[in-house]
Image (spheres, grey):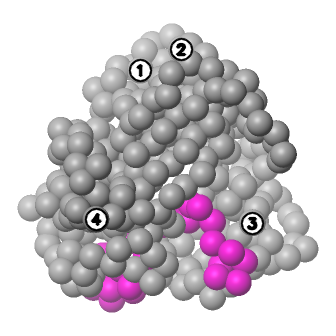
Amino acid sequence: MAPTCLVRGSLNIDEFFRVPHIVNAGETISSTGDLTRRAGGKGANQAAAIARAGGHVELVGAVGKDGQWLKQELYDAGVGVEGVDVYEDISTGRAIIQLTPEGENCIILYAGTNLLPLGPPSEHLVPPITHLLLQNEIRQDTTLAFLKYAKQNGIKTVYNPSPLLPPEEIAKFPWDMVDYLLLNEHEAAALADATSPGQTSKPPGLSEGAPGDADVLSRLQQPQFENCIIILTLGAQGVVASISKDELYYLPVAKLRGTTRDSTGAGDCFTGYFVSGLLQGIEKDNWKTLLQRCVVAAGMCVERPGAMGSIPTAAEVDARIEEMEST
């Protein structure tokens, strides 16, 4: 049986409002263009990205009857959806997304069916599941239960702590149960502030071209993270990876073919391609090969509108990498 990832995560209906700028406190602005609805949710987006990258993936989550089309769209994308339940009397989760002409976004979440418990981990973490991917758009007790069960049963754990937990929850989170931690520079800074306040230093081993935002990585080199591979995405500045205390990498962002249209799904695209690479064992040969593939996929993602619909296929990413290497 092929290695397979279980995603225990959220499914949302994404509602996009195009705005001249992100609204400020006390301000009322008008959106431009039509209201757009698309499939989303970090769990759904990342599961779709794993599938499009060529990995085997199952999703466990829930929608209301207003979101049954989400389940079908995920199935069409190659995601296993037997674990996605449909509820008659609870609304599907929503993401209200402001999107600027520059592609920047601001998101408000409504949890809806994402807060339902949906049964214990032992029902879902069964062969051929080899990896577990979690985020923070479902119940925290559910996340912890799945994380603990996976760790106890030899299943590799991947955690994207977004949206970030409050500082008091960060402090007591079992980080030693996480094998791979994927986060952006804002999440990393907040995590470092909660676990190592006042500590600053540049991580050793990074190339001279690494941006200043990578400094936060050194503040996460603490006992609770010592068994954890940390992948730090830096938006337009690229990605930094801490494989071990002595093995660190920096990759700049991939050059875009066009302009940035929408950054909403870039992080989820990167995460999905990373997990798919783990399933395929790419990192065993070359970490940089895996990370470059993730960076290129995320770069292609921002060239297109939407979240799930903007994720490129493995063939498209292969073609872009071949094009880059030939120029």
Task: From the image, tell me which residue sits under label 2.
Answer: 257
For numbered disc 2, what is the local secondary structure? loop
Circle 3: is it few (<14), some (14-19), or many (20+) Cα within 10 Å? some
First-in-chain label (3 vs 4) = 4
In the rendered view, tell whether residue 84 sits above or below residue 124: above
Distance between the alpha carbons at the discs numbered 2 and 4: 45 Å
Mark 1 / mark 4, whichever is N-terminal: 4
Magenta stretch contains residue 165: yes
- Element marked by disc 4: loop
**In the rendered image, which residue does mark 4 sit on?**
89
Question: In 3D space, how far apart are the residues under numbered discs 2 and 1 (Cα atoms)?
Answer: 9 Å
Residue 229 placement (x, y as % from top left)? 53, 66
Instruction: Report the Cα–Cα distance between label 1 and label 4.
Output: 45 Å
Cβ atoms under marks 2 and 1 closer than 8 Å: yes
N-terminal of the two: label 2 or label 4?
4
Res 187 quadrant in image = bottom right
Q: Position of residue 198 (x, y in %)?
A: 90, 74
Amino acid type indicated by mark 2: Arg
